[in-house]
Image (spheres, rainbow, N blue to C red):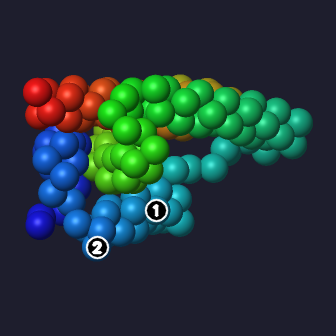
């Protein structure tokens, strides 16, 4: 089996065909963790720049609250999209789809963030930078869940059509 880190659609096709072995599922899960950890430790997901401690903690806590809310709602959304035997499929589907979805979404969102902050000097200033950073962080997580949910719905449809 080939691990498909750039195409959630092809991973979804493999999931619907029940052709991803447990060993490959573990590789997708490992890739998912690494896709989120490596950019964080390489500072590709930047920290706020502000030197004002009140603004720093306010923006940091707002971002934390948004991410917690998005994660809770996003997991529920994905679970609802996994219509065919979610007890059996949800965690496997989510884990396998998370890797390619996260990789492509994070590359696009944080790539755009860095291009904007380099191209538009106003966004390099501390408050604007920090607000844009918060929006990029929340948008990336939101988009990952949205895209995984859409793929899970597609996989469920493929599984349903294969039963007929």
SS category of the residue bearing label 2: helix
| Front tag of 1 and 2 | 2
Q: Are there few (<14), some (14-19), or many (20+) residues within 10 Å of tag 2?
A: few
Numbered label attached to residue 23: 2
At 88% from the left and 36% from the top, the residue drawn is: 54
10 or 138: nearer the viewer: 10
- Picture mark count: 2
- 46 with respect to 56 (left or right): left
Q: In which quarter of the image is residue 66?
A: top right
Numbered label attached to residue 33: 1
SS category of the residue bearing label 1: helix
At 68% from the left and 37% from the top, the residue drawn is: 68
At 19% from the left and 43% from the top, the residue drawn is: 16
Mark 1 or mark 2, earlier in chain: 2
Q: Quadrant of residue 2?
A: bottom left
Can residue 157 be seen from the camera position used here? yes
């Amino acid at each position: 089996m080939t691990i498909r880190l750039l195409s959630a659609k092809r991973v979804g096709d493999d999931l619907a065909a029940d052709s991803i072995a447990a060993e490959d599922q573990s590789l997708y899960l490992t890739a998912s963790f690494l896709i989120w950890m490596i950019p964080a430790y390489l500072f590709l997901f930047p920290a706020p720049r502000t030197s004002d401690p009140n603004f720093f903690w306010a923006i940091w806590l707002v971002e934390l609250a948004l991410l917690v809310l998005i994660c809770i709602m996003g997991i529920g959304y994905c679970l609802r999209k996994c219509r065919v035997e979610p007890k059996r499929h949800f965690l496997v589907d989510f884990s396998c789809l998370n890797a390619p979805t996260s990789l492509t979404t994070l590359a696009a969102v944080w790539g755009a963030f860095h291009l904007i902050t380099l191209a538009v000097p106003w966004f390099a200033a501390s408050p604007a930078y920090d607000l844009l950073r918060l929006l990029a962080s929340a948008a990336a997580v939101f988009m990952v869940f949205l895209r995984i949910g859409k793929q899970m719905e597609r996989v469920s449809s493929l599984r349903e059509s294969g039963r007929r």
